């Protein structure tokens, strides 16, 4: 019969263990830094953060919470995709089935729906905080720009996801939203100069968004692909840039002494 | 500083612990809710299984008791003893040795047989191979090989047959040894079988999984999960009378003809078929679900989805009654309703109304028809006195130039004429259709006007012309042309105008006044605006057919201006599935539930309540009429019905098959256009069901009888009584009703030499016959053999026919009186009718006695002797 330390020792000397956990962890500054360096998920993060920078009452933690909401939405979204067909015959009934029949379907869909609303709110508060603390100023002006793009992408994610249940709410939201596109100068057929540029309902921005002249099966498919693949990909890339710039621009902004 | 840090961190730990606990609790709640809270049907299914278990357990106990009572145990013990004996005999040394020997022989033989079979397969394979090469190369060597192989195969087959024969004989000698005990064992199993079955059923019931039960109809992608809770709905045997476990009511009508696996539930019942999380959601009685559950009689509204003909459809009685209201009030006159395009006008022709009625009456009627008679069908248009006068001016201007009333109050009626008229009135049975003083009007569906005050409404000259030939004034009227002489009509007019009048109205008669041209113009505009021409024919407005939006329309669309001119009301064909947001509740102040059915009901209750400028008149419907009518309208949907569900109407079927719809021909057509036989009788699917169906009258009735009946329907005792409805349907109780006397036979049919009776009889005998009904009993020439008649009489008494039929003064009144049946019916018809009464009248109440051919001959012979001598 071996004692516990002996077993622990044996496990830790095992090749599998060692290939995952490269070194022993001691609570020293060096080891802490090593842990961050050696971890793919943390390496974007600065090795050290000033204590004053993580003060909740300065940053409100809104950026981190936004990222958390994004992760939550990605996970629930992927699971939802298993139960959803982006076709006008099935979309609505698939949503109904999530409510009535799919195991944990209710919590799954509600997490995604409310999580999306939550993310939109939180991302706006984040922007507000950055503005109020003046964190957009040099050298962070580029990152502010990235942030603005991310804000727009968040709105677009929310907007494209709105149509996916194929209900009255989504249908009319997309109808109104794309009609706004149709009235945009130089882009839509209702905008100024459209007749000189030969913009018609069949070649304008609205047509591109809907895949047709009115909201239908193509619009649903486009909205679905933008929502599930294209915009999340762009967002992830910009998020990496955003986080990287945070680190390169001197870490999370902090109160000035 | 250090101290502060420590305090700070301990507070954080508490926070962490608190939120962790909250998260854990929430997670557990999520799991619990998903498993039980959102799946209430699990409880129902468990409960159902318990109920079913109890039922089976009870059956089992009963079967055990029955088994014991019938001495099953003693017999079983006896059999078991026999089995033991047989078993020991089998186990004896000699038998066992023989058995073993035979078995080993059998095994060797079987092995050989298997080998033989393999050899055969092999040879056949080689043969096929050679054949392939031969066809490919045409070389003789392959041909030779093929022949060789064929010989081998034949030899193997022969050998196999011999082996098989040996094996069979061995098998039979083996089974001889075991036959005795196997027979006893089988007997034991058979005895215990019933009980074992029940035990198995109980065990199986326990194994039934608790799961969502779903019917998926692929072509319309409907998934109904109703049976998840209503688990016994299509069961053979009910386990409970209470929902959700009860069986479908009248399932022999509904489910037997609409297999739930093919139709699902929501197709007829609406509701939210996919929902399983709560009763309200599943029944669709929640916000944002436009299709709440239809239950009870209301469900019949769904019959309209598929059935073209509802008439006579079992299980659709309520909705059939309700559709009658569409005809009664002529909704189709202003609204487009599919299937009603060819129904005639509800109201009379108005072109010459000025020569028909009194001016003061017309104004009063326009203001509010119900003030004149509570049973009036014409709705109230909320005209002002001024508007009503303008319309009356317009109508009167078409046949004259003055507003005028004709006052007979100063004249004294001719007493002798009145007396004659009164006799004619009852002979012609005017009260069968018309109500006077609250009496009569039994034949409701012709909607004949109430005549109580008619003497103060119309003038005598018009009344004379009307009775003489109603078609001349109002083509398509339901009023028959009685064959009265001018003298007769004069007396009738005198009687009607003196007996039925309204003294109060006569006091307000107006003196002739010239009609103003401006008023005529105003009246005409009003007539056009409110679409009077929808129900009434009006000179110059024949082309303007309908004015209301149609009641059937696909999806969302808006009426164009030119469509508006065509129809005054909304198209109603898809009102029952119109999206809720398309219904305009507008300025309605009263709070009503926000659903489609409530909208329709409120619209019928208060037609102009939703918006300003609406034109729909108020029909002053009773609450029950509103319910019925809204049920019909609710059934007008554009739901996605697969073609395989559709049951086209007979007319449509005929049209698709290229068959001409049945039409009356020759002189008879002229008679029927006049006498309107089909107001009451049905002939080959045309007409009403108020009086007996005449489709096969030629085969059924004797000529002499028809003649005497038409000449004098009430001389013979009331043979043709209206079937009592036994209180099964609503409506006025039916008294003894005989046909009116139309005085047929006194006039020639137009352009011919034949009297109308001859035309009727000719048509009956030429057209209304069935090849299935012989004139005489087949193969029987003489009808009056005394002993056959006696036998027939004894069968009549034995079977208790007199419980329903009357002969002389004896017997019941449910069936037709048979006192004169020998004169009335053809023997061939009686013979066939006794064989299968339902063949010619599917809903007859006469029981099926299953008479033999002999018995039918006796009965027919007996019935044919029943004759009343003509006085």
Image (cartoon, helix red, strand yellow):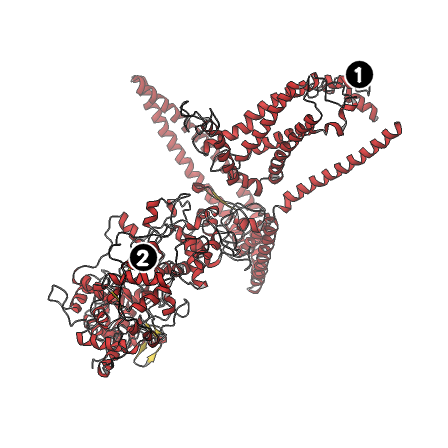
* Residue B864 in view of the camera: no
Using the rendered image of the protein, determine whether residue B498 is visible from the camera's viewpoint: yes
Quarter holding residue B783: bottom left
Quadrant where the C terminus of chain B lies?
A: bottom left
Pointer 1 and pointer 2: residues touching (CB < 8 Å)?
Answer: no
Instruction: Name the spot of residue B265 as percent of width and height, x first.
Output: 48, 50
Between B701 and B664, the residue placed more toward the observer is B664
Numbered disc 1: secondary structure: helix
**Left-right relation of B23 to A237:** right
Q: Please tell me whether residue B632 is drawn above or below residue B778 in the rendered image.
A: above
User: What chain is tagged by disc 2?
Assistant: B
Q: Look at the picture and state if B17 lies above or below B232.
A: above
* Depth order, front residue of B704/B25: B25
> Callout 1: residue from which chain?
A
> Do circles 1 and 2 both sit on a common chain?
no
Quarter of the figure that contains the N terminus of chain B: top right
Q: Is residue A163 left or right of residue B357?
A: right
Which mark is on residue B745? none
Identity of the residue furthest to the bottom in this view: B415
Mark 2 surroundings: few (<14), some (14-19) or many (≥20) residues within 10 A = some
The residue lying toward the viewer, choosing from B652 and B126, is B652
- Position of residue B290 measured from the top left corner of the image (x, y, whole percent): 50, 48
Label 2 secondary element: helix
Q: Position of residue B215 (x, y in %)?
A: 49, 45
Tell me what residue is drawn at x 59 percent, y 56 percent: B51
Q: Is residue B51 left or right of residue B500?
A: right
Give the residue number, with chain letter if any, for mark 2: B522
Q: Counting other residues with Cα less than 10 Å from the Cα at mark 1, is it few (<14), some (14-19), or many (20 or more)? A: few
Q: Which labelled disc corresponds to residue A30?
A: 1
Q: CA distance from mark 1 to mark 2?
A: 102 Å
Q: Point out residue B744 in the picture as x, y percentages from the top left corner.
A: 19, 71
């Amino acid at each position: 019969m071996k004692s516990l330390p002996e077993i622990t020792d044996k496990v830790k000397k095992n090749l599998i263990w060692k290939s995952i956990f490269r070194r022993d962890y001691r609570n020293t500054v060096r080891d802490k830094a090593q842990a961050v360096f050696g971890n793919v998920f943390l390496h974007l993060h600065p090795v050290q953060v000033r204590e004053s920078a993580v003060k909740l009452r300065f940053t409100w933690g809104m950026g981190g919470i936004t990222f958390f909401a994004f992760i939550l939405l990605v996970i629930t979204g992927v699971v939802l995709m298993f139960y959803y067909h982006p076709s006008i015959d099935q979309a609505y009934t698939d949503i109904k089935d999530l409510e009535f029949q799919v195991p944990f379907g209710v919590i799954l869909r509600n997490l995604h729906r409310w999580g999306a609303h939550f993310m939109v709110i939180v991302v706006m508060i984040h922007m507000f905080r950055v503005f109020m603390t003046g964190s957009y100023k040099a050298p962070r002006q580029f990152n502010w720009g990235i942030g603005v793009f991310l804000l727009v992408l968040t709105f677009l994610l929310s907007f494209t996801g709105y149509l996916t249940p194929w209900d009255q709410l989504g249908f009319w939201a997309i109808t109104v939203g794309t009609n706004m596109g149709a009235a945009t100068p130089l882009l839509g057929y209702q905008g100024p100069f459209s007749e000189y540029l030969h913009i018609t309902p069949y070649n304008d921005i609205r047509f591109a968004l809907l895949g047709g002249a009115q909201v239908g099966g193509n619009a649903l498919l486009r909205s679905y692909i933008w929502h599930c693949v294209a915009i999340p990909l762009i967002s992830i890339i910009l998020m990496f840039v955003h986080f990287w710039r945070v680190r390169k621009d001197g870490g999370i902004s902090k109160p000035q002494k | 500083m250090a101290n502060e840090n420590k305090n700070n961190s301990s507070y954080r730990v508490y926070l962490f612990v608190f939120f962790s606990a909250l998260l854990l609790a929430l997670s557990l709640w999520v799991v619990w809710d998903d498993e039980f809270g959102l799946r209430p049907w699990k409880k129902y299914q468990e409960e159902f299984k318990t109920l079913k278990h109890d039922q089976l357990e009870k059956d089992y106990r009963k079967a055990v008791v029955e088994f014991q009572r019938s001495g099953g145990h003693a017999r079983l013990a006896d059999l078991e003893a026999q089995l033991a004996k047989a078993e020991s005999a089998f186990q004896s040394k000699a038998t066992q040795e023989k058995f073993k020997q035979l078995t080993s022989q059998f095994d060797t033989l079987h092995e050989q047989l298997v080998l033989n079979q393999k050899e055969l397969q092999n040879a056949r394979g080689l043969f096929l191979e050679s054949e392939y090469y031969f066809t490919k190369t045409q070389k003789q060597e392959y041909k030779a090989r093929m022949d060789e192989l064929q010989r081998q195969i034949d030899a193997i087959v022969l050998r196999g047959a011999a082996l098989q024969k040996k094996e069979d004989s061995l098998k039979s000698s083996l089974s001889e040894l075991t036959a005795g005990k196997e027979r006893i064992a089988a007997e034991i199993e058979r005895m215990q079988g019933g009980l074992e079955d029940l035990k198995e059923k109980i065990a199986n019931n326990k194994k039934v999984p608790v799961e969502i039960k779903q019917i998926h109809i692929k072509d319309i992608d409907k998934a109904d999960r109703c049976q998840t809770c209503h688990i016994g709905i299509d069961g053979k045997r009910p386990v409970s009378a209470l929902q959700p476990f009860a069986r479908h009511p009248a399932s022999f009508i509904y489910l037997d003809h609409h297999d739930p696996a093919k139709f699902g539930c929501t197709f007829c019942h609406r509701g939210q078929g996919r929902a399983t999380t709560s009763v309200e959601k599943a029944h669709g009685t929640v916000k944002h679900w436009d299709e709440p559950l239809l239950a009870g009689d209301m469900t019949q509204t769904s019959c309209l989805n598929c059935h073209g003909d509802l008439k006579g459809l079992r299980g659709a009685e309520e909705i059939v009654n309700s559709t009658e209201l569409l005809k009664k009030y002529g909704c189709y006159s202003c609204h487009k309703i599919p299937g009603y395009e060819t129904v005639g006008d509800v109201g009379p022709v108005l072109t010459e109304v000025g020569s028909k009625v009194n001016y003061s009456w017309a104004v009063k009627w326009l203001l509010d028809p119900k003030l004149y008679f509570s049973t009036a069908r014409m709705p109230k248009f909320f005209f002002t006195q001024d508007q009503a006068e303008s319309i009356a001016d317009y109508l009167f201007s078409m046949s004259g130039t003055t507003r005028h009333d004709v006052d007979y109050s100063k004249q004294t009626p001719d007493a002798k004429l009145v007396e004659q008229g009164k006799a004619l009135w009852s002979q012609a049975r005017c009260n069968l259709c018309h109500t006077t003083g609250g009496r009569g009007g039994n034949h409701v569906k012709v909607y004949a006007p109430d005549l109580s005050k008619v003497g103060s409404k119309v003038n005598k000259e018009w009344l004379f012309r009307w009775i003489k030939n109603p078609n001349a004034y109002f083509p398509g009227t339901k009023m028959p042309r009685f064959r009265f002489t001018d003298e007769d009509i004069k007396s009738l007019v005198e009687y009607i105008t003196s007996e039925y009048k309204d003294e109060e109205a006569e006091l307000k008669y107006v003196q002739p006044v010239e009609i103003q041209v401006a008023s005529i113009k105003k009246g005409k505009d009003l007539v056009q605006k409110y679409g009077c021409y929808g129900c009434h024919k009006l000179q110059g407005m024949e082309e303007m057919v309908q004015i209301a939006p149609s009641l059937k329309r696909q999806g969302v669309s808006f009426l164009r201006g030119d469509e508006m001119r065509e129809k005054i009301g909304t198209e109603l064909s898809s009102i029952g599935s119109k999206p809720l947001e398309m219904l305009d509740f507008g300025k309605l102040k009263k709070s009503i539930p926000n659903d489609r059915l409530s909208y329709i009901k409120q619209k019928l209750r208060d037609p102009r309540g939703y918006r300003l400028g609406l034109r729909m008149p108020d029909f002053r419907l009773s609450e029950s009429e509103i319910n019925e009518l809204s049920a019909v309208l609710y059934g007008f949907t554009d739901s996605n019905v697969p073609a395989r569900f559709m049951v086209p109407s007979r007319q449509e079927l005929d049209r698709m098959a290229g068959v001409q719809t049945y039409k009356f021909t020759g002189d008879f057509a002229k008679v029927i256009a006049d006498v309107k036989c089909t107001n009451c009788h049905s002939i080959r699917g045309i007409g009403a069901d108020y009086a007996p169906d005449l489709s096969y009258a030629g085969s059924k009735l004797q000529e002499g009888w028809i003649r005497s009946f038409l000449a004098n329907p009430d001389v013979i005792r009331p043979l043709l009584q209206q079937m009592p409805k036994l209180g099964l349907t609503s409506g006025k109780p039916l008294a003894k009703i005989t046909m009116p006397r139309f005085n047929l036979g006194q006039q020639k049919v137009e352009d011919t030499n034949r009297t109308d009776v001859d035309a009727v009889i000719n048509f009956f005998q030429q057209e209304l016959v069935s090849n299935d009904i012989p004139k005489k009993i087949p193969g029987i020439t003489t009808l009056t053999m005394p002993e056959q008649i006696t036998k027939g009489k004894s069968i009549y008494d034995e079977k208790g026919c007199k419980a329903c039929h009357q002969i002389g003064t004896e017997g019941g009144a449910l069936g037709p009186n048979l006192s004169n049946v020998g004169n009335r019916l053809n023997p061939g018809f009686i013979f066939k009718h006794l064989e299968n009464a339902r063949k010619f009248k599917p809903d007859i109440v006469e029981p099926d006695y299953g008479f033999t051919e002999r018995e039918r001959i006796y009965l027919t012979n007996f019935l044919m002797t029943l004759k009343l001598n003509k006085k």
